[in-house]
Image: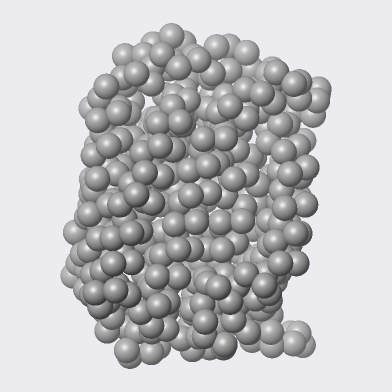
Amino acid sequence: MEFSRYRRILTLAAPIIGGMASQNLLNLVDTAMVGHLGAPALAATGIGGFTNFLAIALILGLSSGVQAIAARRLGEGKTEFAAQPLHGGILISLGFGLPLTLLLAWLAPYFFPYLNADPEVIALGVPYLQVRLIAGCMVGVNFSFRGFWNGVQRSSIYMTTLVAMHITNIFLNWVFIFGNLGAPAYGVYGSGLATSIAVTFGTLLYAALSLRDARQFGFLRAPPTLESLRVLVRQSLPSGMQQLFFAGGLTALFWIIGKVGTHELAAANVLTNLMLVAFLPGLGLGLGGASLVGQALGRGDAADAKRWGWDVARTGAALLGLIGLPMVLFPELLLAVFINDAAALALAVVPLRLAGLAMAVEGVSFALMNCLLGAGDSRRVMLVSISLQWGLFLPAAYVAGPLLGAGLLGIWLINLAYRMLLALSFYVAWRGGRWSKISV
């Protein structure tokens, strides 16, 4: 790969990775703070967090749709129309997301006990989930802004906003979890409250920065047209469905692990949050690659678009392979930061080491998945992701864990096999090249 291409990938992806790193650093800080409250608290935030993800997953798909369309318009030279998909994303997030999340917040006490039968986990998890859901539509707006700024190659705006938002969140965690500065010590509920306030602050900051810097792209110069909304929904719905089923799969996975034991569930919560942080460079590189692919296709250069995909995949494999080394060599040291319970810690060591060994392949997977989304091939990504997760992984995990007694380790081995098949599927799809003929 030419150095200039490598430099362009990293220049575009570095702010994205930085912003996402702050997001998942926040998750880890949350986990570390809540970990001091015990295994039930960790289990409650794990189930609550991923149930919240499930509730808002459909509108999170707007991010990839907004990014693909904005990048394509920039490549076509239609700069003044690049913000049209952002307008649509904001409208859909507020009009659809707000009633949905408020309804789910009201219903949370009724459906949460089906996710975990432990009375202490239920008592902690319900109010945590409710306060997270109240700000759910703001997350959809934030993701729409994220897709827009990444699509027009101004990812530094995204990074600036997320870093500010997450510094706010960490500070509010310290205030509301432990009762500092005269506030009540809300514990688990305080973690959710802090996150919701910070997300709302992030939305306001995005809006202010966009009023300053996005007018040249048509921001707030004209309302979205019916045709632009139709194109956005067509591009975003498959990605939203993928996110919905992925989030549902995570919630189902936590339900499966919860049937094995509360210590296993607490260990899985920490493992999942650690992996989400470790995946960030691959995901950030993929989002950068999505913009490069979209703009190349906008110029009519499918060969360059394909080359960008391979360049990003190689970079992702190298970077995530390096990140996986500490997981292989020092899993106990990493886990001890977040888990105070000796039994939960012992359960998490081998799964983390195995995950570290597979990190290079994960780098390829995230890179090519997002490049496919940048090309507008969201339907294929959806079908591959849903079929492997729900048709293979989750049934096998249930059989191995609760039925056969293979425990957390058995479930994690099946998870790694599923992730490898996912990477192989995206590799084959990118190599085939049918994505280059999709109109956006």
Q: Toward the viewer: 210 or 420?
A: 420
Point out the residue furthest to the top here.
300
Q: Position of residue 309 (x, y in %)?
A: 32, 28
Where is the C terminus found, in terms of image quarters? top right
Q: Toward the viewer: 307 or 414?
A: 414
129 versus 224 height, above or below: below
Q: Position of residue 44 (x, y in %)?
A: 54, 78
Q: Toward the viewer: 249 or 209?
A: 249
* Residue at image coords 29%, 74%: 403
Residue 356 visible to an observer of this rendering: no
92 versus 74 height, above or below: below
* Residue at image coords 42%, 83%: 262
Q: How many marks?
A: 0
77 versus 125 height, above or below: above
Q: Write down the quadrant of residue 315 in the picture.
A: top left
In the image, taking residue 352 as reference, residue 240 lies left or right, namely right
Q: Position of residue 278 (x, y in %)?
A: 36, 58
In the image, taking residue 56 as reference, residue 8 lies left or right, namely left
Where is the N terminus found, in terms of image quarters? top left
In the image, taking residue 281 as reference, residue 396 lies left or right, namely left
* Residue at image coords 50%, 56%: 248
* Residue at image coords 58%, 11%: 77
